[in-house]
Amino acid sequence: MRSLSLTIFGLLVFGLATIQLLSYGIVSTALNDRTRKNMFDFMANDIALVYELLAPLPRDRRQAMMPKLNRGFYVLRLQDQKPKLPAASRGKIPALSTVSDRIRAATHAPDLYWVWNSNDDPLLVVLLPGGQYLLVEAAEPLPSLSQMDLLVYLAVLFLSLAALSWLAISLAMKPLARFSDAALQLGQDIRAPLLIEGELREVRHVAAALNMMRTQILKQVQNHAQMMAAISHDLMTPITRMQLRAESITDETLRTKLVGDLQFMSGLIVETLNFARSLKMEERIVAVDLDAVVEMIRDQMIDMGHVVTVSGEIGTPVAAAMRSIQRVIQNLVDNAVKYGERADIVLERQGNRAVVQVRDKGPGIPDEHFASVLEPFFRIETSRSRNSGGTGLGLAIADNLVRAHGGELILTNLREGGLEAKVVLSLSTR
Amino acid sequence: MLGASRGTMNERAVPIRKDHILIVDDDCDIRNLVAEYLERNDFNVSMASNGRELRRRITSHERFDLIVLDLMLPGEDGISLCRYLSESPVASVPVLMLTARSDDVDRIIGLEAGADDYLTKPFVPRELAARIRAILRRARSIPHNLRLTHVGRVLRFGEWRIDTVERCLIAADDSVSPLASAEYTLLSFFLEHPGRVITRDQLISHLMGSHNVGPFDRAIDLRVSRLRRRLEDDARNPGYIRTIRNEGYMFAKDVISE
């Protein structure tokens, strides 16, 4: 998977480096050529002038002129012997021949040539009339821009440009990162709208599209829920009639069986309605004393002859919908006593979270069913659950309601046997 | 033997006036079936199919002990009729509301409009009869203007408040917790009789019906001790529910409507 930031960064850095190198090359070449040409022209004309001045003078007068001619551009010396220095090949430094050619053109000097001095710098030898030699060399060794300096300069420039591009990219990418976080949240809770404000236009457009998709999905879910609710609702009146009619049946066995079936049906209808409603929880969020809710459920379950224990406490109110959160815990406890013989509830405050764990002593959930137990109408098909008359909606309703609270329902098979259903709710006000 | 025969003689000697129930429901079958069922259970039943009929019967000074009112009616709906009943000269007639939706919204609106209790369809007929009897018992023992739902929605007692529509406790820090049906019935009975000694028998007959006396003593004590725990009341030095030795209990706080 490629990161957009890194790709753009790579492109920018590559482009910057190329531009930098090219422009440096062009500028320095152009600048050097120009400067050199000017320098060589000046040097040639100057030396030609010196030659013109010295040539007609007798040998003894020439030396007296020298201090006046030495103006600091280069060092001029007179010498009677021919200097014993190696000749500089013309091919090695083309500029040298340019200078000598120009001097020749300016003066008709019969003889001049380049040699290397002891420092390996070029030295010009001009033969004056009367067998004297004029030596011209640079006042000080030619300053050359060192290769090292150039590299350091380029590296500093390159690094600062790279840092600048990275800063620019991360600045530009920040809305995108925030956007991706928001979109991720949308995946977790479809009910919460995607909030993107004051961001890039492109990001806003995508956010709007996502929000539109979210509305569509919600509408579909609600249509679905409405349909289920409508069917269930329409079944209520006939079932009410049937329940009333069953009361006048004199055959007691028949009546008991019929009433039992009707009660199962009406239970299924009520649960279906509850499920439909859990998809769009509309109950008000208030501060709920979850410890008291659990205590109440325990007392009721004990009255019905079940084994339910409570340990620990949360100790602080939780922002929740009272009846919905009561239903969540009731459903989990119902499941525990139905499939796991008993319910042991552990209340705990973990930092900024309220945790309610409901543990049982049942067989737990087979691994292959873990993904589906939260699906509506799903039942693990063992003979026991088929007889127990569950609707397969209890966990789905609990899961929907917990998610509507921004919380999490986590199911785990305990190592010591039994299932643990854990509800985690945030304590911070939303 | 003797006691039993005397009881039978008493029942014969005093003709029992049957409670008069008015059933208001637009579904003809349900109306008739409910009427039949209630008649079999010793009620005297009349029927109305809509709000107009209900109003006509009320204004013609017919006397009812209780009205079973369906929330969804053609024309004037149950909520509006409920309000009409609680403001009319027959305000003392208790109302049992029937709703087809188990929505909390419907229930809350109905209770706010002055219904005494509610039952959602589909209901078990026995549950209907039990609810009617419970409401009638309450109506007999407490004048209607003192009945909790008629006093106000939120009542304060000591540190606590109760929301009679949501049926929940509100603590001093505004956090809420739901009351189980039995807890609510018990607490509301105490709140309706502050400062008075309530015998166990009274509690039993109120909570479970008059025919169940005896083995319920311990159940009542258990419920009271649970209620004390909910109210964080110290059983040794109770500030809310005092034990009156050899008599019963007394609710020791003033009840103020908010």
Image: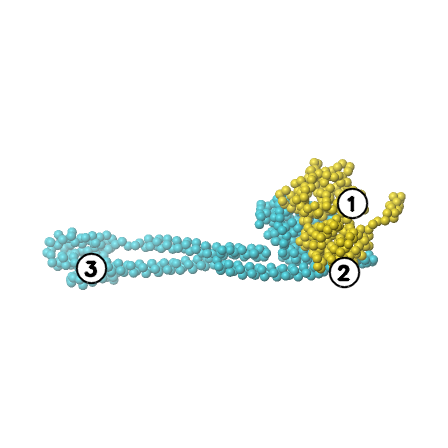
Which chain is rendered yellow in the image? B
- Compare residues A345 and A331 and report the one nearer the observer: A331
Q: Secondary structure at mark 2?
A: helix
Disc 1 and disc 2: Cα gap in Å?
A: 35 Å
Colour scheme of the rendered structure = by chain
Residue under numbered circle 2? B28
Say whether marks 1 and 2 touch (CB < 8 Å): no
Q: Residue at x 68, y 58 (%)?
A: A272
Residue under numbered circle 3? A44
Question: In the rendered view, would you say A298 is above or below B124?
Answer: above
Q: Are marks 2 and 3 on the same chain?
A: no
Q: Secondary structure at mark 1?
A: helix
Q: Mark 2 or mark 3: which is in front?
A: 2
Q: Mark 3 or mark 1: which is in front?
A: 1
In the image, what residue type sits under mark 3?
Ala
Say whether marks 2 and 3 touch (CB < 8 Å): no
